[in-house]
């Protein structure tokens, strides 16, 4: 019948309209339907009823662990009195090479004897060019660059604020564990595994390390990798 679809659509709209008010009453005295994390979780779930609009920026949706925005550089947690922990980046330059839009610039440090130092002296990422692909983080052999969850980076100052320097990019490993606990745990397990295997190979008692293919297989079986890669 002509117009039946319109009637059905209007009925759903009307139902949501009424349910919004009923939900208001339900959350009355429990912090309210809006600007309330507990209520937001219900509104955004399958149990949500009525209007599901998020009132950003007062309300924010939590992002999944695999969410990725511009990268940051991992450092050790700073010790007492320290501003920064030790950089994990060795300035190998792999991330800059694989970056499709070429928005990473690195200047390697120099030791007093003039030899290259395995730490970046400067590290820049132009976040307006970065397309958040995550390839730099995928290719980094030292787990030293990770994709951040901080997406509120807009500003009117294009020339300086959008070119992140080493200081702006550096964040401690505890931050990574906080925003991506499962992945951080799996990476730590893979690093420990690789380290132990290396030690085994070097051991003088003749115990040989696992064959490379076997080692690779074991790393692949670690929880996070099995689940997401
Ligand atoms: S790939 Fe990793 S270690 Fe190499 S320069 Fe990039 S962030 Fe640093
Ligand atoms: S996320 Fe992609 S575009 Fe952005 S810096 Fe990394 S490799 Fe380059």
Image (cartoon, helix red, strand yellow):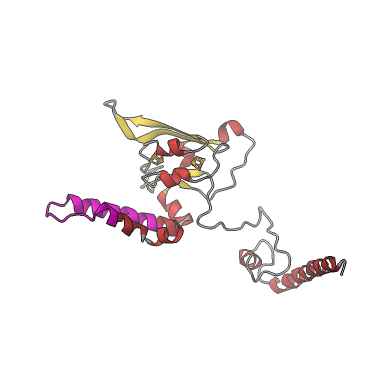
Residue at 54% across, 39% down: 130
Residue 205 colored magenta? Answer: yes
Q: Residue placed farthest to the front in the image?
A: 1
For the N terminus, which image quadrant? bottom right
For the C terminus, which image quadrant? bottom left
Q: Is residue 60 above or below residue 47?
A: above
Residue 73 x %, y %: 44, 43
Inspect this view and state whether residue 39 appears.
yes
Q: Residue placed farthest to the right in the image?
A: 2
Q: Is residue 107 above or below residue 227?
A: above
Inspect this view and state whether residue 145 appears.
no
How many marks do you count on the picture?
0
Residue at 41% across, 50% down: 173
Where is residue 16, by image quadrant?
Answer: bottom right
- Quadrant of ligand 1: it is top left
Overall secondary structure of the magenta stretch?
A: helix
Q: Is residue 227 above or below residue 103?
A: below
Q: Residue placed farthest to the left in the image?
A: 205
Where is residue 32, by image quadrant?
Answer: bottom right
Residue 79 x %, y %: 36, 47
Residue 10 x %, y %: 82, 66
Report the magenta residues as a range: 185-214
221 sits to left or right of 208: right
163 sits to left or right of 207: right
Q: Nearer the viewer, residue 165 or 89?
A: 89
Residue 126 colored magenta? Answer: no
Q: Residue placed farthest to the top in the image?
A: 114
Residue 95 x %, y %: 43, 39
């Amino acid at each position: 019948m002509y117009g039946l679809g319109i009637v059905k659509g209007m009925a759903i709209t009307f139902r949501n309209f009424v349910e919004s008010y009923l939900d208001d009453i339900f959350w009355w005295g429990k912090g309210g339907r809006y600007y309330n994390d507990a209520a937001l979780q219900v509104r955004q779930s399958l149990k949500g009823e009525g209007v599901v609009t998020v009132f950003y920026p007062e309300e924010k949706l939590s992002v999944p662990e695999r969410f990725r925005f511009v990268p940051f550089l991992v450092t050790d947690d700073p010790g007492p009195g320290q501003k920064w922990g030790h950089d994990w980046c060795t300035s190998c330059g792999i991330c800059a090479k694989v970056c499709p839009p070429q928005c990473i610039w690195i200047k390697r440090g120099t030791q007093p004897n003039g030899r290259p130092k395995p730490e970046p002296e400067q590290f820049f990422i132009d976040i307006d060019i970065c397309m958040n692909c995550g390839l730099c983080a995928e290719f980094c052999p030292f787990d030293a660059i990770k994709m951040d969850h901080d997406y509120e980076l807009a500003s009117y100052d294009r020339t300086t604020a959008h070119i992140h320097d080493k200081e702006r990019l550096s964040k401690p490993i505890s931050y990574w564990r906080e925003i991506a606990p499962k992945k951080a745990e799996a990476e730590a397990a893979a690093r420990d595994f690789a380290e132990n295997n290396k030690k085994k190979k070097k051991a003088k008692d003749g115990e040989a390390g696992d064959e490379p293919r076997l080692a690779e297989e074991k790393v692949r079986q670690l929880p996070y990798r099995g689940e997401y890669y």
